[in-house]
Image: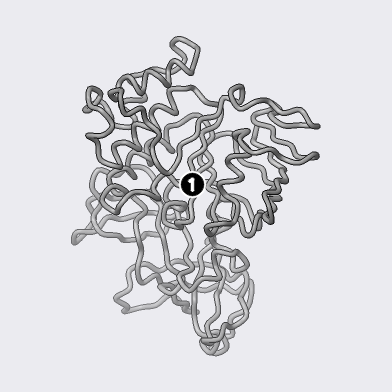
Amino acid sequence: MSIEVSVRVQKDDFVLEAAFSAPSSGVTAVFGRSGCGKSTLLRTLAGLEAAQPGSHIVVNGEPWLQEGNSIPTHRRQVAYVFQEPTLFTHMNVRRNLEYGLKRNGREGAVRFDEIVSLLGVEGFLARRPGTLSGGERQRVAIARALLSAPQLLLMDEPLAALDMHSKRDILPFLDRLCAESRIPVLYVSHSPEEVVRLAEHLVVMEQGRVLEEGPLQQVMGRIDSPLARADDAFSVLTCAIAEPAGPCGLSVLRTAAGESMYVPRLKDIHGNIRLKVDARDVSICLERPVGSSILNVLAAEIVSLSEADAKGQILVQLRLPVSGENLLARISEYSAQQLSLLPRRKIFAQIKAIALLT
């Protein structure tokens, strides 16, 4: 089962012409610059924008829009979380959440206590929205959306209106939501950091069209991806935590190929962890280095090399063994020539810095 979308919408001079397929569970991020059509796409999925003939939307086998027949918004079982929380200010938090249950229409279909705990709002059920911080209000809005038992949760830049402190406050709860939710989530953002932290699948948009889609790590790690054009191009790796309390204040991670990686000591984190690796922090060696202060060195194979930019820099797409994950390295064209770098060549990638996506 999946979400199948092919829609065309015209609003004045702007045309949205988007087609993609997304998994029926987990988080699909819709990424792109402001004005590229992300919000219009979500509104079309919700039935708030009319699509032109020939468009279709199928969610888990159920046609919401097909051959001119459109299911109205109230029957699509979709929940929508906006940038600004749309809560009833005259009601306390509990009554706001109970409104979501009332929209559900199916007694017992969703457990109130489970959702309240998932979003961490149990401590202020008796308070009114006006007394909450921005992050707390958004958590309530998300909890109310989930209590309506949707088939699809749409989140339109839910962190955009929050300050940095409020974003840090809500992100751990979004992590839990994305990890534990059993419904598909379409998460709109123009923040790469939010995307790589929360999503498994990625849809990249530009000027009303889908440029690329696929599993997050595949799209992020290709030199022809729109995300690789920027000076701050990066890739995402997933590792298992092997030794939380490793040597000298470090934690030891393990790649799928069994290689060790070292990061600052982790606390209260278990299972797998995502790492953000900036391309400019990856260098290439033909042999495994000896006597280096750089701890993280991974065996890899070159997939492809980009053309040099105006600064004489190129991107090298590397592939890790076993997992097949992509890793980007930004090096000088001169270095690539001196090392005779070519596709399919086996090399070693030195990683100078790693950001934990936690």
* Residue occupying image coordinates x 39% and y 17%: 111
In the foreground, 140 or 257 = 140
| Secondary structure state at the residue bearing disc 1 | loop
- Identify residue for label 1: 199
* Residue 48 appears in view: yes
On the image, the x and y values in percent for residue 239 come to: 41, 52
On the image, the x and y values in percent for residue 13 come to: 69, 56
Identity of the residue furthest to the left in this view: 248
* Residue occupying image coordinates x 54% and y 34%: 184
The answer to whether residue 182 is above or below residue 217 is above
How many C-alpha atoms fall within 10 Å of the one at disc 1: few (<14), some, or many (≥20)? Answer: many
* Residue 321 appears in view: no
Quadrant housing residue 52: top right
Quadrant where the N terminus sits is: top right
* Residue occupying image coordinates x 74% and y 36%: 56
On the image, the x and y values in percent for residue 42 come to: 58, 41
Quadrant housing residue 278: bottom left
On the picture, is 166 further left or further right than 51? left
On the picture, is 343 further left or further right than 187? right
In the foreground, 89 or 18 = 89
On the image, the x and y values in percent for residue 267 come to: 23, 47
On the picture, is 278 further left or further right than 170? right
Identity of the residue furthest to the top in this view: 107
Going by the numbered disc 1, the residue's amino acid type is Ala
